[in-house]
Image: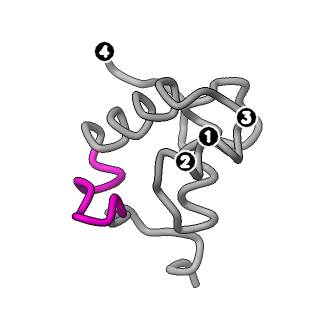
Amino acid sequence: GGSGGGGGNFEDSDDPYDQAVAVVLRDGKASTSYIQRRLGIGYNRAASIIEKMEKEGIVGPANHAGKREILVPTEDDKF
């Protein structure tokens, strides 16, 4: 493993995972359907991206409503 890079801008990446992370952090919404709509990808792809985010500690597990808490600072938290 080991992810390289120096904390650059996710939005410039062609990787759907990076783009999804950027969307989640910017919009503060981490749901499979939201990722689907924003990136124009299929449900299974979006679900696996969300699962990867959970493993990486970016988002928490889904609650009863399918909403996930975002565990890393979002843009609103920056000064």
Q: Earlier in the sequence, mark 3 or mark 4?
A: 4
Q: Which residues are magenta?
A: 57-67
Sort mark 2 into few (<14), some (14-19) or many (20+) by Cα contacts within 10 Å: some
**Distance in Å between CA atoms under marks 1 and 3:** 5 Å
Q: CA distance from mark 1 to mark 2?
A: 5 Å
- Give the residue pinned by disc 4: 1
Q: Which amino acid type is shown beneath numbered disc 3?
A: Gly
Image vertical order of residue 28 relative to residue 47, above or below? below
Tell me the element at label 4.
Answer: loop
The answer for how far apart the CA atoms under marks 4 and 1 are is 26 Å
Q: Amino acid at mark 2?
A: Ser
The residue tagged 1 is 36
Whether residues under marks 3 and 4 lie with C-beta atoms below 8 angstroms apart, the answer is: no
31 w.r.t. 12: above or below: below
* Closer to viewer: mark 4 or mark 2: 2
Coordinates of residue 38 in the picture (x, y in percent)? 71, 47
Residue matched to label 2: 33
Label 1 close to label 3 by CB (< 8 Å)? yes
Q: Amino acid at mark 1?
A: Gln
The secondary structure type at the circle numbered 3 is loop
Mark 1 residue element: helix
Q: Label 3, label 4: how many angstroms apart (C-alpha)? A: 27 Å
Q: How many residues crowd around disc 4 within 10 Å: few (fewer than 14), some, or many (20 or more)?
A: few
Asked where in the image residue 35 lies, by quadrant, the reply is: top right
Image marks 4 and 1: residues in contact by CB distance under 8 Å: no
Asked if residue 65 lies in the magenta stretch, the reply is yes
Q: Which mark is residue 40?
A: 3
